[in-house]
Image (spheres, coloured by chain):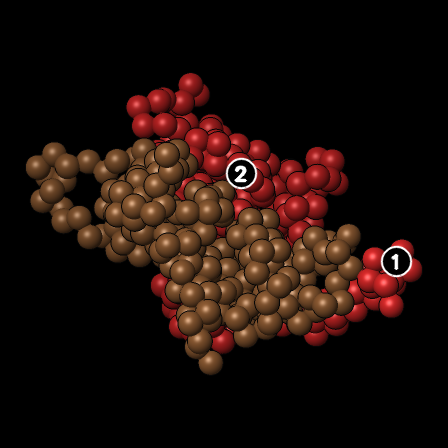
Chain colours: A brown, B red
Amino acid sequence: MLSKKNKEALFNPLSKDNPVLVQILGICSALAVTASLEPAIVMGISVICVLAFSNVIISFLRKTIPTNIRIIVQLVVVATLVIIVQQILVAYKYDVSKQLSVFIGLIITNCILMGRLEAFAMHNSPWPSFLDGIGNGLGYTIILVIVAFIRELLGTGKLFGFQVVPQWCYDHGYENNGLMILAPMALITVGCIIWVHRAHNKELQED
Amino acid sequence: MNKNSNTYQILYAAVMVLLVGSMLALIYMALKPKQNENIANDTRKQILSALHIAAPSDELVKETYEKYVIQDLLVDSEGNVVDSTDNAAFEVQMKKNVKLPDAERKLPVMKCKMDDGSVKYVLPVYGAGLWGPIWGYIAMNEDGNTIYGANFSHEGETPGLGARIAEQEFQELFREKHLFVDGEYKGVAVLKKGQKTTNGAEQVDALTGATITSLGVSDMLADCLYRYEAFLKKLGSGGGTQCTADAAPAETIESETNDNQPE
């Protein structure tokens, strides 16, 4: 089940081959949904599901897909899955679907999906593809959560919507940093995380 | 078969599109009734939230709504009630309603009776935020002047920024604001901290980092509420007060039927 190669497919994306930190994919959504923790986590879970299943489907179809229209086929599979997820959420988890609003649709445009389908699922069998999808989704989710944690804590003094910075800090002159909840700080935060990550992983450093 | 021949590609694409299309259509048809019910219940929840009422559970939203909302009204710009059939106001699609020419536009009002016997009027509003439509429900006291509560929703405002219009913290700011100043309609504005309205209207603080959405709320209120001016004035001038006298006990069927519309 978990041969060395499969383990790599699952665990490499968490750090050494992280889609956000190393491949710099999925930055747009990392920017949009990380102003607070809750949407970041739900978005992460949705991406994991869609990525894993589209990887499996494409992997099953990989021998039949004509090379010329493979991108279209991939896109159709991803879009179908996303629409199904969206419809099911509206029918059974209306509150969650409302909270994610447009972002669930934006999963279609997440570069990680097309990247993994094209780079992995097109050349590997379903089980490793499934693991690769889970791994990359998790790698993406971890970064979203870290960024959202930093932004929500510094930007609003809350976590998951609950106040965590005590009132006496405000009484002594502490202020929430409004800049943190604006989009540019998401990029700067991601930049800082990449910096720390590369400083710790010598093999990732470029000349 | 050659995977790169034109025939194969076209066939492949056609079959794929047919399969996917019919699958999505089936799923859509199957889930539609459930989704519509969710959407209607969500609207009910928003209206109840403007009245500061929380339904005990998701299953009881409809019952709770029907308990408090006693009458649906459609009024014209003169403040006259033109329709008061059941669900007349609830079924108004605000998206379409705001696009109608002024003369044809009927304004929905939900008349509600609270546990303490007081009567509130819920006015739907609809406008544009930064990314898409925003809408809300403003509950008015029966003096037709004081805002009792407000609820705002949006389709796709940025989470953490514009989406905060849907949070209680922002909605609470509208409580006890007055639409009329010295008997003259002024509305209520959403402005940056420190800014003042030019016409003396009451105001609430805008959201940090969500200038466009805040402006959207302000414009939405300005655009939708002034149309109710005549209706609200009639409430204020005593038309509505007659209800309080007999509504005081508890909710009986009798007091409901006595609630004649101010005309």
Q: Along the polypeptide, which appears first: circle 2 or circle 1?
A: 1
Subunit under mark 1: B
Q: Residues within 10 Å of mark 1 (few under 14, many from 20)?
A: few
Alpha-carbon span between mark 2 and mark 1:
49 Å
Residue at point 41% right, 53% down?
A: A18
- The kind of residue on which mark 1 rests is Ser
Residue at point 30% right, 48% down?
A: A201
Q: Is B144 above or below relative to B35?
A: above
Subunit under mark 2: B
Residue at point 46% right, 71% down?
A: A6
Q: Which residue is mark 2?
A: B129
Q: Is residue A120 left or right of residue A194?
A: right
The single residue placed furthest to the top in the displayed view is: B198
Q: Nearer the viewer, mark 2 or mark 1?
A: 1
Q: Quadrant of residue B225?
A: top right
The single residue placed furthest to the bottom in the displayed view is: A1
Whether residue A149 can be seen here: yes
Whether residue B36 can be seen here: no
Residue B148 image point, x, y percent? 39, 49
Residue at point 72% right, 68% down?
A: A63
Name the image quarter holding the N terminus of chain B. Answer: bottom right
Residue B20 image point, x, y percent? 75, 66
Q: Is residue B71 left or right of residue B243?
A: right
- Considering depth in this image, is A14 or A37 the residue closer to the camera? A14
Q: Which residue is mark 1?
A: B5
- Considering depth in this image, is B197 or A153 the residue closer to the camera? A153
**Label 1 secondary element:** loop
Q: Is A4 above or below relative to A136?
A: below
Q: Say how many tags the image has.
A: 2
**Label 2 secondary element:** loop
Q: Quadrant of residue A117?
A: bottom right
